[in-house]
Image (spheres, rainbow, N blue to C red):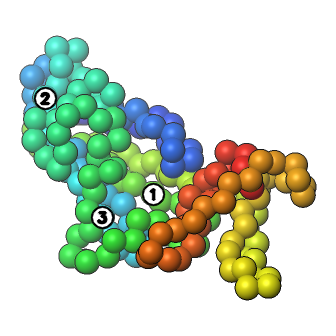
Amino acid sequence: MVPTLSIQPADALIDVPRQIRVEHVAPGQTVEITALTRRNGVLWQSHAAFVAGEDGVVDLTRDAPVSGDYSGLSPMGLVWSQSPVDSPSREHFNHPVSEPLVTEVVARVAGAQSVARFTQRLAADGVTRQEVREEGLVGTLYLPPGATPGSHPAVLILNGSGGGINEPRAALYASRGYA
């Protein structure tokens, strides 16, 4: 049997959970799943092994791994447990944030494999970015699609002692309707 890997939705904002399923597997068979994401030029990876249910399916919304980089039930565990391969990088998002994260998922079962990809976006189509440099104020303003002044609630994001501007979070808020 050749396993079938499906990921839904295949393209959405980063805060939308994905359903990752491997079908057409013999019940009780071990399924190894690897997730690979290039983040700002650095390859990040995670791995977990699962046991197919009596229905011949591994569904990350219902099945916890038996081994790997995370434990317990977590539909997006293969994403949040990723770590950089051969790099000390801790950069989680692409720059600019308009570049999506594309994750390749590989499912291996008894010598056969299936590959699928999904895309995580931080900024929805139409989100705009404006640098703010006025009267000592330094920041970046992200506006929802079609925003006019005063037409949306605003969120102010302040970083801690590390400084910097949290553009990924601001872009996601703008994607959800907040300036």
Q: Residues within 10 Å of mark 2 (few under 14, many from 20)?
A: many
* SS assignment at label 2: strand
Instruction: Identify the residue shown where x is 34% and y is 50%.
Output: 79
Q: What separation in Å lies between label 2 and label 1 (alpha carbons)? A: 26 Å
Q: Residues within 10 Å of mark 1 (few under 14, many from 20)?
A: some
Residue under label 3, please give it.
44
Q: What separation in Å lies between label 3 and label 1 (alpha carbons)? A: 11 Å
Asked if residue 32 can be seen in this view, the reply is no
Near-viewer residue (121 or 9) = 121
Position of 148 with respect to 129 (left or right) is right
Label 1 is placed on what type of residue? Val
Q: Residues within 10 Å of mark 3 (few under 14, many from 20)?
A: many
Identify the image quadrant of residue 86.
bottom left
Residue under label 2, please give it.
51
Label 3 is placed on what type of residue? Trp
Q: Nearer the viewer, mark 2 or mark 3?
A: 3
Position of 52 with respect to 162 (left or right) is left
Q: Is residue 25 above or below residue 38?
A: above
Label 2 is placed on what type of residue? Val
Q: How far from the left and from the top, in percent, is residue 120?
A: 50, 52
* SS assignment at label 1: strand
Asked if residue 70 can be seen in this view, the reply is yes
Disc ID at residue 102: 1
Q: Is residue 168 above or below residue 113?
A: below
